[in-house]
Amino acid sequence: NAGVMQNPRHLVRRRGQEARLRCSPMKGHSHVYWYRQLPEEGLKFMVYLQKENIIDESGMPKERFSAEFPKEGPSILRIQQVVRGDSAAYFCASSPPGGTYGYTFGSGTRLTVV
Amino acid sequence: AQSVAQPEDQVNVAEGNPLTVKCTYSVSGNPYLFWYVQYPNRGLQFLLKYITGDNLVKGSYGFEAEFNKSQTSFHLKKPSALVSDSALYFCAVRDIWDSSYKLIFGSGTRLLVRP
């Protein structure tokens, strides 16, 4: 079991470009969560998705950010027109259905905007 | 709204001494509580959780945590610290009535174990 796979591990984008972050959940996990970790800070919830559905996007910035979890393929976190303040580590986590399980985290994607 | 407080940015302890990393929480209903550890440039690793039952929960690497409902706390403890325990520790909470299942994390506590 490969665990939660995130790619790329590191991503450098110039201001104004688009960033696409991918996350493949653990086998058997149908819930995906995205978190952002700014330098020297904790994790901030962004969005929770199930297959083809956004369940809770209360932590997503209203503009430039979007997420999807299609029927086939990985979950994608998309950031359009990146700015320096988007530089952070973005972590994906997955869990099975039901709320008593903790998450399994991926190793994260470190986005640097130059 | 759910929230988690980790009042200490950093905890310093000598190897072989007991350690405690503090966590308090706030939820409107009953909590599910978790501890995670993060090593440099890595994702978070699950340590232990409290769902129901015994207030003392044992987890990975010799860590344990005690759920105290009256004090709304879930402090992480270990009887004898190792240098390799040095890392960033996060407490997280979920309200069992929150249908979105999301975990709310504290700001993290850096544990430094000196030889």
Image (spheres, coloured by chain):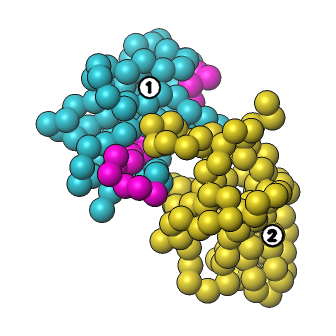
Q: Residue at x 66, y 78 (%)?
A: A65
The residue furthest left is: B70
Task: Please say if the residues under marks 1 and 2 sit with CB atoms less than 8 Å apart.
Answer: no
Question: Residue A88 colored magenta?
Answer: no
Nearest the viewer among B109 and A102 is: A102
Looking at the image, residue A79 lies above or below residue B34:
below
Position in image of residue A18 (x %, y %): 81, 79
- Report helix, strand or loop for mark 2: strand
Position in image of residue B71 (x %, y %): 17, 38
Does residue B7 appear left or right of residue A111 in this picture?
left
Question: Residue B86 colored magenta?
Answer: yes
Mark 2 chain: A
Nearest the viewer among B11 and A73 is: A73
Q: Residue at x 65, y 48 (%)?
A: A30
Q: CA distance from mark 1 to mark 2?
A: 41 Å
For disc 2, the marked residue is A20
Q: Residue at x 37, y 32 (%)?
A: B51
Looking at the image, residue B22 lies above or below residue B20:
below
Q: Which residues are magenta?
A: B81-100
For disc 1, the marked residue is B13
Chain identifier matching the yellow colour in the rendered picture: A
- Report helix, strand or loop for mark 1: strand
